Image (cartoon, rainbow, N blue to C red):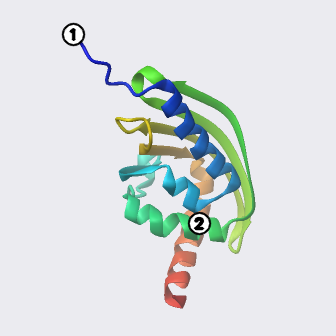
Amino acid sequence: MATNTTPPAAVQRLTLTNFIAAWETWSAEDMIACFSPDIQQRSMPLALGIPGRSRKEIEYTLPKLVQAVRNYSLKVSNVIHDTARNKAAIYAEAQGDTPFGDFQNEYACFVEFDDKGEKIKQLDEFMDSVFLMRFFPGFKRYLEEQSKGS
């Protein structure tokens, strides 16, 4: 007799709902709470050369990003949840203000849940390449300044 290894759809849905709610409210702590201990996050397209992040790196970077982006708003336009494959896709647009310019980004995020469906173990974020080319150098300088002040 075969066993079902796919987590219940309701568990995945709750994890997805919690992640989107945390993203919409711009809460680093609540977003990180949705991630598995072994999460891998990738900024895409990969051709941009932005290194992937482990949970430890996310725990450092994400709160700094949240701190830097004020007047944040997120509009989620599309969510596709494939319970059989343990995955979801989200399309969203974000806006905000930073000390180094406007924050206007488009996202297509691909989420993969852990074996229980309770946490996100893979987060691939396709972002607006033009925005990233402008934003990333300023954010990198911001992180360096923040680490000097700590």
Residue 109 at x, y percent in the picture: 53, 40
Q: Amino acid at mark 2?
A: Leu
In this rendering, position of residue 52 left or right of residue 17: left
Name, please, the residue furthest toward the right. 71
Q: In the image shown, does 59 or 42 lie closer to the viewer?
A: 59
Q: Nearer the viewer, residue 127 or 89?
A: 89
Q: Is residue 100 above or below residue 118?
A: below
Q: Position of residue 57 (x, y in %)?
A: 41, 65
Circle 1 crowding by C-alpha within 10 Å: few under 14, some 14–19, many from 20: few
For mark 1, what is the residue? Answer: 1
Q: Is residue 76 left or right of residue 38?
A: right
Q: Residue furthest toward the front?
A: 1
> Within the image, what quadrant is residue 86 found in?
top left
Seen in the picture, residue 61 relative to 113 is either above or below; the reply is below
Q: How many marks?
A: 2
Q: CA distance from mark 2 to mark 1?
A: 48 Å
Circle 1: residue type: Met
**Residue depicted at 43% across the width and 35% down the height:** 117
Which badge, 2 or 1, is on the more N-terminal residue? 1
Query: From this viewpoint, which residue is outermost toward the left?
Result: 1
Residue 84 percent across, percent down from the top left: 42, 20
SS assignment at label 1: loop
